[in-house]
Structure formats: C-alpha cells, structure tokens
Amino acid sequence: MGETPESFGPRTIVRLFGHLRRRILVIAVCFPALTAIIYIFSPWILGRLQHHLGQKLAFFGVMEPVLALLKLSGLMAITALMPIIIWQLSRGLEAVFGFSRRTSFVIFAASLILFFTGTAFCYFVTLPLGIQFLLGFQSEHLHPVIAVGKFVDFVVFFVGGFGLIFELPLVIPIICRLGICRPESLSQGRRYAVLVIAVFSALLTPTPDLLNMSLMAIPMYLLYEVGILLAKVSGRSCPATMT
C-alpha cells in the first residue's frame, strides 16, 4: 500500500457509486436467481442447522415456513455472492481512490477471509452457546416451543452481523488512508471505543449475560486494535479532513 489515494469527499462518493452502479445491477440480478436455486435445497439446509444447534421447530402461520426458508436462502445466496461483491468493491476503490492493483487484491483477500472467519465464529461458537444459555431457563413446567420464523431471523441476523463486524481490521486502515481519521486519534480514544463496543455487544448478543457479551465484545476490541496496528504499519495515513 505505497500509493497515496485520492482524498475522501462527496465527489469521490458520487464517483464510487457511479463506478459500482453497473456491477451492483449485475449482483441484484444474480441474487434472486441464486436465492431461487438455493430455495430448492433450503429444507435440507434448515435440517442441518437444526441438527447443529439441537433444536426442534414449530410454525404458527401458513406462510411462516415459506418465508423462513426464503430468508435462509437469501442469507446463503449473499454468502455465496460475497466473493463477487467484495471483489467489485475493491475494484471500485482501486478505480476511484487510486489504489494499486496489488492493494486492491489485498483488500479483496483480507475482506473475504475476515467475513468468513466472522460467520464461522458465530456459527460454531456464539450461536450454540447463546441458544444453550437461553434454553437453560426451561423447567418441568416450562418447555420451549421455537417458531421457525423467529429461529431463522435469529440465525440470519447474527451470522451476517458477525461477518460484517469482523471486517473492522480492514475498514480502519482504509478510512485512515482516505483521511477520514488518524490511527493516533483512534489509539487515544480507546476508552470510548471500549464503551461503544460494550454497548453494541449488549444490544446485539443473543443473551444479556456477561459470557455471551464477551464472545462479541472481546473479538471486536481485538479487531479494533489490529485495525489500528495495520493502519500504523501502512504508514500512509492521510491527515484527517473532518473538523
């Protein structure tokens, strides 16, 4: 990342959207087509998800199973299209902000790895522990009946959310290189970052207990620190343009 990118501003945002407009249209066409294909296999996917999390599901409306399977298919379609989406975004940064082809590829590879690491962490760690804790309140006189719609909403929200949260180490160096902020200011604002992360984790984690909050808060803070480190290592952060 040796080149100096164009400064961030309204004009560059317009240029970026203009550059991505055709690519976004292609993705918008591919998404419903891929969702329809995945929908054929969605009952099997839901069955594997139930088995992984150890849950039996019920439904309370005629359309609830159909909508739940559509949402699940949509998540799988977005996940499958994520390499294309990230590649197009990295090429957009290359064209609009003047990043080199090497930088564009590094952004693509790092973003892809971070996204799938986040989804895997949520799927194999956070979701099982969160659901196990929530269902721990059942008793002899209180048995859970989980609606398939609520269950799929829960899974889609957290798996997708963790995938995006894990992009933090990449987002921080990029915004520093675009002059939106400086690594030094982020380092000095650690205590505020800890507060924001704690509140964010309390709002988004499946359960309000300290264990599950920590499963999101600790990785987020570590990712925040990694992002600052990478921004400093790049050595080309622009002075902040925001006042």
Image: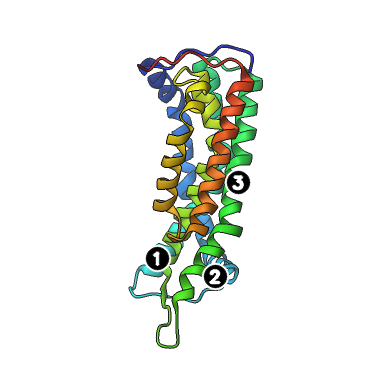
Crowding at dot 1, Cα within 10 Å, few <14 / some 14-19 / many 20+, comes out as some
Q: Position of residue 194 (x, y in %)?
A: 47, 40
Task: Name which quarter of the figure residue 149 lies in.
Answer: bottom left
Q: Determine whether label 3 and label 2 are within 8 Å by CB.
A: no
Q: Position of residue 172 (x, y in %)?
A: 52, 29
Residue most extreme to the left? 61
Q: Position of residue 215 (x, y in %)?
A: 54, 53
Q: Amino acid at mark 3?
A: Phe
Mark positioned earlier in the residue sequence (2 or 1): 2
Label number found at residue 50: 2
What residue did someone put label 3 on? Answer: 116
Label number found at residue 150: 1
Per the model, the C-alpha gap separating discs 2 and 1 is 13 Å
Residue at (54% x, 70% y) in the render: 50
Mark positioned earlier in the residue sequence (3 or 1): 3
Per the model, the C-alpha gap separating discs 3 and 2 is 21 Å
